[in-house]
Amino acid sequence: MSKLFLVPTPIGNLEDITLRAIRILEESDLILAEDTRTSGKLLKHLKVSTQMQSFHMHNEHRMLERMLEKLKMGMQIAMISDAGTPGISDPGFLLVRACVENDIPTECLPGATALIPALVQSGFPTDRFIFEGFLPPKKGRQTRLKEWAEETKTIVFYESPHKIVKTLGQLQEFVGGERRLSISREISKKFEETVRGTVNELIIHFEEKAPKGEFVVILEGKK
């Protein structure tokens, strides 16, 4: 029976993949991978020999119809991203939406994603939070930051190492230097680290210690 599976892959430690995820990857007719070179290393480690095909942000629009045809023919397709859960700041949404519109079954396996561990260990309220993905690089960035100044729920977003100091400076400007943060990097990897403090304190921290790795930023809501 045709079905699209969204299969989370480890964000760091390779032991974080589930037994069910490995089985689905083995049983699928095709694996759609964001980067076949990166995913190839994982599949080799897992001893999975299923055929792979590239499916990423630069080709997903033109690949949609082709993948839908394969699914309509009865194929079982597994989608993976370089790390974490497909569709969360990674390709996946367009194909899932197309499957829903065409009554093709979809199933997302539970598994690794960076935002939940960072949120849970932040110490900020987790009962209500908003996830913003990556901030817009230019257009709409200031509008988003102005909204955060009044947001009472915990805010979660991703940031790259070469932008983190600049982003903290913008938070200082728009939400204030005394708003508290928890910033996690390299989650589930050897050099995993979480630092906590006010915006002002963490600006100093990252100016003195060069930021490395991918960051998950947890911003306390307005009290």
Image (cartoon, rainbow, N blue to C red):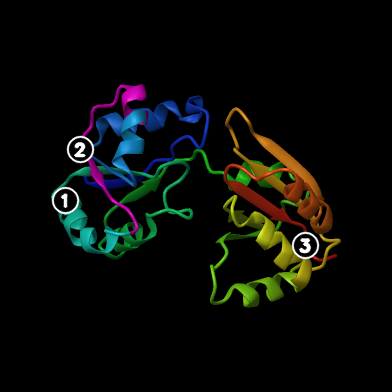
User: Can you say whether 175 is above or below 53 in the image?
Assistant: below
Residue positioned 78% across, 51% down in the render = 202
Q: Which residue is mark 1?
A: 70
> Percent from the top left, x then y, of residue 96?
34, 57
The residue tagged with tag 1: helix, strand or loop? helix
- Residue 154 visible here: no
- Residue 209 visible here: yes
Q: Amino acid at mark 1?
A: Lys
The residue tagged with tag 3: helix, strand or loop? loop
Res 151 quadrant in image: bottom right
Measured in 3D between alpha carbons, the distance from the residue under mark 1 to the one under mark 2, in whole angstroms, is 10 Å
> Percent from the top left, x then y, of residue 135?
57, 64
Is 50 magenta? The answer is yes
Q: Which residue is mark 3?
A: 221
Is 159 magenta? The answer is no
71 relative position to 158: left or right: left
Q: In which quadrant will I find the N terminus?
A: top left
How would you rate the neighbour count of disc 2 (Cα within 10 Å): few for under 14, some for 14-19, many for 20 or more? some
Q: Which residue is mark 2?
A: 29
Q: Which residues are magenta?
A: 42-57
Measured in 3D between alpha carbons, the distance from the residue under mark 1 to the one under mark 3, in whole angstroms, is 45 Å
173 relative position to 42: left or right: right
Q: Amino acid at mark 3?
A: Gly
Pointer 2 or 3: first along the chain: 2
> Percent from the top left, x then y, of residue 58?
31, 59
Pointer 1 or 3: first along the chain: 1
How would you rate the neighbour count of disc 1 (Cα within 10 Å): few for under 14, some for 14-19, many for 20 or more? some
